[in-house]
Image: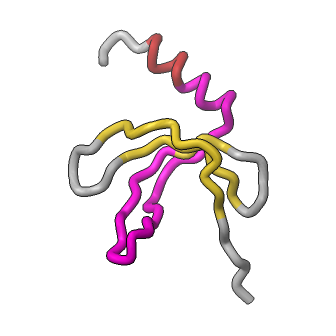
Amino acid sequence: MKKAFNYEIEKECGVVSTAGSLPLELHLISFNGAPAKYDLRKWRAKVDGTRSMQKGLTMTREELLDLRAFLNAMEDI
């Protein structure tokens, strides 16, 4: 039997990019009632006004901060 999947966007942090047909957005999302994590993914608008999530990357606050430090330390970007 397939488990129900639900999510709640607790905070919309912002749009990272609008290049292409789908916006890349960063949100703080709780999946299936678990503690919220940062979520970076593209979202597709549907005809009925709702949106569906596409493939993305989910990380804890600590992982997000580590990623920021890693990117800040890169010299060749």
Considering depth in this image, is 62 or 45 the residue closer to the camera?
45
Q: Residue at x 45, y 20 (%)?
A: 71
* Residue sitting farthest toward the right: 34
Q: Looking at the image, which residue is at 54% across and 26% down?
A: 67
Nearest the viewer among 69 and 49 is: 49
What quarter of the picture does the C terminus occupy?
top left
| Residue 7 picture quarter | bottom right
- Viewer-nearest residue: 48 or 65: 48
Counting every numbered tag in the picture gives 0
In x, y percent, where is residue 11?
Answer: 59, 42
Residue 38, given in percent of the width and then of the height, sits at 60, 41
Image height of 10 relative to 46, above or below:
above
Name the residue rendered at 49%, 41% in the picture: 26
Residue lying furthest front in this view? Answer: 49
The picture places residue 60, in percent across and down from the top left corner, at 67, 37
Magenta highlight range: 40-67
Above or below, comparing residue 9 to residue 1 in the picture: above
Q: Is residue 72 magenta?
A: no
Quarter that holds the N terminus:
bottom right
Q: Residue furthest left?
A: 20
Residue, x 67% and y 31% (percent of image)? 61
Image quadrant in which you'd find residue 16:
top left
**41 magenta-colored:** yes
Measured from the top left, where is residue 35 in percent x and y? 77, 47
Q: Is residue 39 left or right of residue 30?
A: left
Display coloring:
secondary structure
Q: Quadrant of residue 66?
A: top right
Is 4 rendered above or below residue 63? below
State left or right for residue 6 relative to residue 34: left
